[in-house]
Amino acid sequence: MEDDIFLQLSNLLNGNDSKPTLSSSSGPATPFGAPDSTMFTEDDMIIPDIKPKKAAGERRKIVVIDDDFSTLDLLKIYLQRDYDVEVFDNPKNAIFYLNGVIPDLIFLDCYLNVMSTKKVLEIIRTYKELANVPIIYLAEPSEQAAIESKLPEGVVDIISRPVSRMDMQRMLDSYILPEEEEEAETSDSDGIL
C-alpha cells in the first residue's frame, strides 16, 4: 500500500494527468487533488494510512509549520545546531511529512492562510503515534492574548513572534525531555525497572 501512495504522489508531482487515488481502510478510494491546484481545498485533503515511525538513536526532531518565511528562517537558525529541523510554509506538505515521522516537538502558526490551523490540528491528532507530541503555537503579540485562554487540545503553549532565543530555550527545556529521562519514562511504562 505504501508503495502505491508514493508512486501516485510521484506521478502527481511529475505532471501525470491521471488523478491518483488513495485508499483507506475506512472507505473507498478517493480522488487526490484536482487538475487546477487553485481548486484544491482543505476538505479535499486526503490522509494516507502510513504509520509514522520514530528511529532510535537519532537527533531530536522538530517540525515548524508557518507561512511567515522570516519566522521559519529564524527558528531553523536557532534549532539546527542541536536538532533535526524540518520547516514547512505549506501545512499540506507538513502533513505528508508527519505521515512517516514522529517529531519530538511541533511549532505551528496559530493562523495559517493555506489551510486552517484547526484542520491541521485535527489531521495531526488522527494519528495516535502523534498524540503525545507537544504542539506550540507561534503567534503575534496581539493574537496571543486572544487565544491564550482557549488553547485547543494538544497545544501546550504559545510563543510570541519575533521569537527570542531565550523564549525558545525555555520552550525546549519545558517540552523536550533529555534522552535519559525519556528512556527512563519508556522503561517505567513498559514495566521495566
Image (cartoon, rainbow, N blue to C red):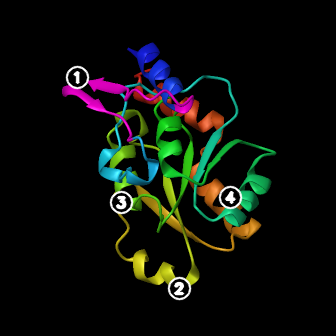
Q: CA distance from mark 1 to mark 3?
A: 24 Å
Question: Is 32 covered by the magenta stretch?
Answer: yes
**What amino acid type should be assigned to the residue bearing mark 4?**
Leu
Depth check, mark 2 against mark 4: the one in front is: 4
Q: CA distance from mark 1 to mark 2?
A: 43 Å
Identify the image quadrant of residue 83. Answer: top right
Q: Is residue 104 above or below residue 135?
A: above
Q: CA distance from mark 2 to mark 4?
A: 20 Å
**What amino acid type should be assigned to the residue bearing mark 1?**
Ser
Identify the secondary structure beneath mark 4: helix
Residue drawn 37% across and 29% down?
19
Instruction: Give residue 182's position: percent from left, percent from top.
Output: 56, 35
Q: Which residue is mark 1?
A: 25
Q: Which residue is mark 4?
A: 72
Badge 1 or badge 3: first in the primary sequence = 1
Q: CA distance from mark 4 to mark 1?
A: 35 Å
Q: Which residue is mark 2?
A: 142
Badge 4 or badge 1: first in the primary sequence = 1
Query: Badge 1, how many Cα within 10 Å: few under 14, some, many 20+?
Result: few
What quarter of the picture does the N terminus occupy? top left
Identify the secondary structure beneath mark 3: helix
Q: Which residue is mark 3?
A: 118
Q: Is residue 48 above or below residue 63?
A: above
Residue drawn 35% across and 52% down?
42
